[in-house]
Image (spheres, grey):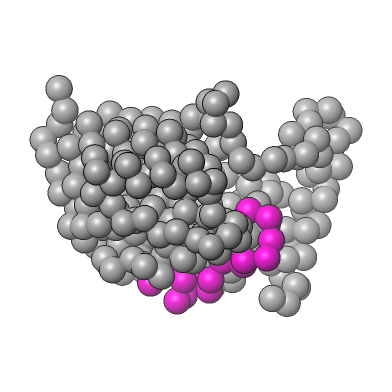
Amino acid sequence: MSEKKRGFEQVTLLVTHYNRSKSLERLLESFASYDFTFGEILISDDGSKQEHINYMENLQNKFEFKLLKAVKNSGLGNNINKGQDAVTKPYTLYVQEDFVPLPGFQKVLEDGLGILLDDPEADYVRFYSYFAHPKVKYYRDGFSEMIFDPWSADTNKFHLYSDHPHIRRSTFLDKFGRYNETKHSDKIEFDMMISFLRNKGKGYLFNDYKSVFDQINSSTEPSTVKRDFWRNSNNPVVSLMRYLYRQYIFNYSYFLKKY
């Protein structure tokens, strides 16, 4: 049985999409099954194949959303910028199409929005992560503020910002700049992470960050992001080299690099 219906009229659900229309359908089905209502739903497409455009247009008969099309594939940075430009509500719930909300997310979203409403210095609240942030300060309702310690040896300290599902102020780009439209998705996320740190961004992370969203990449609609051996290898030598490289590139980018 679903929880009591909750409306989020101040929130735009922004979903970025590329060639995974069945995954998008699964995401929208999940939100609908938990009785979510948003002020608006925007699907920002990055030049998908026509078969996926047709499928999404058919989905509009079932779900009420605005489809933002692209003339050509221009990358994730362009796709997020295009979507954020179209947002008309003061808060944006950003989710990529390969995620699905899990039971109980209604309350977590409500609490996350409450943090943005109550803390004028908060820029965004994240609901999902691959790992725990190394330094946090508990706030309330299962959320903790992520703290950046520039002198820590843990490179995960830099990840105050992430493209993982989060709610943010719709003025986010005004403070931190637009997403780079010429780089790979990992690199544009890295650039935004550095901008977030340099501009003294403040973010919160849900402590039980694997409990409210699931990331699903099926065999029929696999991830469209390709990562190399260097990033994924567990070889001890490669891991050490990767750690030393990250120490250099993260610290250089934060302290010295000009953007």
Where residue 191 sits: x, y (%)? 64, 63
**Residue 246 shown in magenta:** no
Q: Is residue 235 visible?
A: yes
Asked if 117 appears above or below 246 in the picture, the reply is: below
Q: Quadrant of residue 127?
A: top left
Q: Quadrant of residue 68?
A: bottom left
The quadrant of the picture occupied by the N terminus is top left
Q: Which residues are magenta?
A: 171-185
127 horizontally vs 180: left or right: left
Q: Is residue 116 visible?
A: no
Identify the main secondary structure in magenta: loop
Where residue 167 sits: x, y (%)? 36, 54
Between 8 and 55, which is closer to the camera in this rendering?
55
Q: Residue at x 58, y 60 (%)?
A: 72
For this orientation, the residue located farthest to the left is 4
Where residue 200 sits: x, y (%)? 51, 70
The quadrant of the picture occupied by the C terminus is bottom right
Between 97 and 237, which is closer to the camera in this rendering?
97
Q: Quadrant of residue 240?
A: top right
Where residue 181 sits: x, y (%)? 62, 66
Asked if 33 appears above or below 251 in the picture, the reply is: above
153 horizontally vs 170: left or right: right
Q: Residue at x 20, y 42 (%)?
A: 36
27 horizontally vs 36: left or right: right
